[in-house]
Image (cartoon, rainbow, N blue to C red):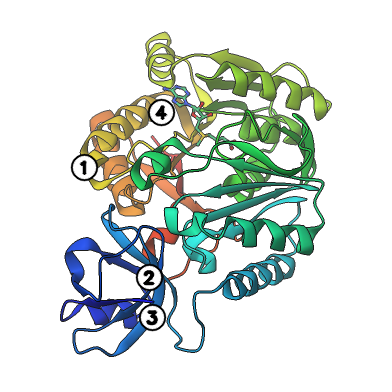
């Protein structure tokens, strides 16, 4: 196996459990590295630190799979990790037949996302090194879950950065365009091949449930960036009187409308619009809501994009604060690791200053537990939500 030595000092973070080695941290290779091959990582003095895989073309050059000399980066290790991830999900007793089975570094399987939708599975490889284990992953999932179909999704960002070979394709069996999944007392259609991400934003499951418990009956609710209508439908089902869902995607709204019906509901106003324009208009018109949910896509895929993203958040929050009734609830989310909880709180404070509003923090929510957050791997926590009550 290729031997890689890291520069002095880098061993500290690896020993603490952080599984990435950046290109600038590498001191030497035993020979020229090949994209995707497995490696042994050693400290500057040559002592063992871990096993991983390498992509010399990217900034995060090595991702570690094991810190244990006895656990080599073999297909057996991948299989063992998948089984372990499954045991953890079983222990959670999630109130849904749709869940994230593998959360990349959160399950010590960097570069692998696996979402289960009832009897169907969506897989996403986000690194070249993990793609090398595609057959092992597929075969293990077949053995473990006996699915009816497995579909590979490819995200354009990873494909470009990592130079992935995969195409969106059926890997096994059949996958229908419409799978019905249940979540608490709700049902949703999921379209794996055509949908965003792997088909549904499973990570917001707990937040959708949290919203349900906030609704007492009769509220006016606005779900901005609603996608397939999760928050809007949760609110309506719980007794909200007037609900509006806004998204830019026609396909998402089509799904949202179907989901409304599927849940025996009617009357939600689905609006196809750019959220920024929509909120601006609502503000100008003097509209007011009891609950405003703002769940935008990732505005910052890397550090360089943070400043711009924060400007976007500021605008959303200023508008959001203006249109939330006194005593009403405003929720804001970031699904980008780079926009942290601290960023959200800071920009919220700024927006409160500009709008002369005072808010009481009512809750913070995070990705649901089937998207595990490893304390030593900060990147595994990506979804944060702040719920505030607008007091003035
Ligand atoms: C993170 S998802 C929202 C997930 C949703 N809250 C749920 O629980 O399923 C972000 C959504 O924003 C939509 N979107 C992206 N840019 C937009 C824009 N400028 N205006 C309105 N919607 C937008 C996407 O189509 C996507 O459905």
Residue placed under numbered mark 3 in the picture = 50
Where residue 80 appears, as percent x and y from the top left, is: 64, 74
Q: Decide: marks 2, 4 in contact (CB < 8 A)? A: no
> Which residue is identified by label 2?
19
203 sits left or right of 155 in the view: right
Side (left or right) of 345 relative to 197: left
Mark nearer the N terminus (1 vs 2)? 2
Q: Name the residue that disc number 1 marks.
A: 304
Identify the secondary structure beneath mark 4. helix
Q: Residue at x 52, y 42 (%)?
A: 166
- Precedes in sequence: disc 2 or disc 4: 2
Mark 4 vs mark 1, foreground winner is 1
Report how far apart the C-alphas of labels 3 and 2 lie in the structure. Answer: 9 Å
**Label 1: how many Cα within 10 Å (few below 14, some 14–19, many 20+):** few
Depth order, front residue of 277/326: 277
| Residue at figure coordinates x 62%, y 16% from the top left | 270
Q: Are marks 4 and 1 in contact (CB under 8 Å)?
A: no
Q: Secondary structure at mark 3?
A: strand
Closest to the camera, between mark 3 and mark 1, is 3
Q: Residue at x 53, y 21 (%)?
A: 247
The mark that comes first in sequence, 3 or 4, is 3
Q: Is residue 23 above or below residue 346?
A: below
> Relative to the observer, which residue lies in front, 245 or 221?
245
């Amino acid at each position: 196996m290729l031997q890689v030595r890291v520069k002095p000092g880098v061993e500290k973070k690896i020993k603490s459990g952080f599984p990435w080695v950046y290109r600038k941290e590498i001191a030497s290779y035993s020979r020229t590295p090949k994209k995707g091959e497995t490696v042994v990582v050693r400290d500057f003095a040559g002592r063992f630190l871990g096993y991983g895989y390498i992509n010399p073309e990217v900034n995060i050059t090595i991702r570690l799979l094991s810190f244990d000399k006895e656990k080599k980066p073999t297909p057996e290790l991948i299989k063992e990790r998948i089984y372990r991830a499954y045991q953890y999900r079983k222990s959670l007793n999630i109130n849904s037949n749709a869940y994230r089975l593998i959360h990349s570094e959160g399950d010590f399987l960097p570069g692998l996302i696996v979402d289960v939708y009832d009897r169907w599975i969506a897989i996403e490889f986000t690194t070249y090194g993990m793609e090398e284990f595609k057959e092992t992953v597929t075969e293990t999932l077949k053995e473990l879950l006996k699915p009816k179909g497995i579909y590979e999704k490819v995200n354009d960002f990873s494909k470009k950065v990592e130079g992935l070979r995969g195409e969106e394709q059926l890997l096994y069996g059949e996958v229908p365009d419409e799978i019905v999944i249940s979540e608490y007392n709700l049902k949703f259609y999921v379209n794996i091949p055509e949908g965003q991400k792997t088909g549904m934003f499973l990570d917001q499951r707990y937040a959708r449930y949290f919203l349900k418990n906030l609704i007492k009956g009769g509220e006016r609710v606005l779900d901005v960036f609603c996608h397939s209508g999760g928050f809007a439908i949760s609110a309506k089902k719980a007794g909200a009187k007037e609900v509006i869902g806004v998204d830019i995607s026609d396909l998402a709204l089509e799904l949202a409308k179907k989901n409304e019906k599927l849940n025996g509901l009617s009357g939600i106003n689905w609006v196809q619009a750019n959220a920024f324009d929509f909120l601006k208009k609502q503000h100008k018109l003097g509209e007011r809501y009891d609950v405003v949910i703002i769940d935008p896509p990732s505005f910052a895929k890397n550090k360089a994009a943070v400043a711009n993203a924060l400007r976007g958040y500021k605008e959303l929050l200023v508008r959001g604060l203006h249109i939330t009734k006194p005593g009403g609830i405003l929720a804001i989310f970031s699904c980008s690791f780079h926009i942290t909880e601290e960023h959200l709180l800071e920009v919220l404070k700024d927006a409160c200053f500009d709008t002369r509003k005072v808010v009481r923090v009512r809750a913070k929510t995070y990705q649901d537990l089937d998207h595990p957050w490893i304390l030593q791997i900060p990147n595994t926590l990506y979804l944060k939500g702040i719920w505030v009550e607008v007091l003035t």
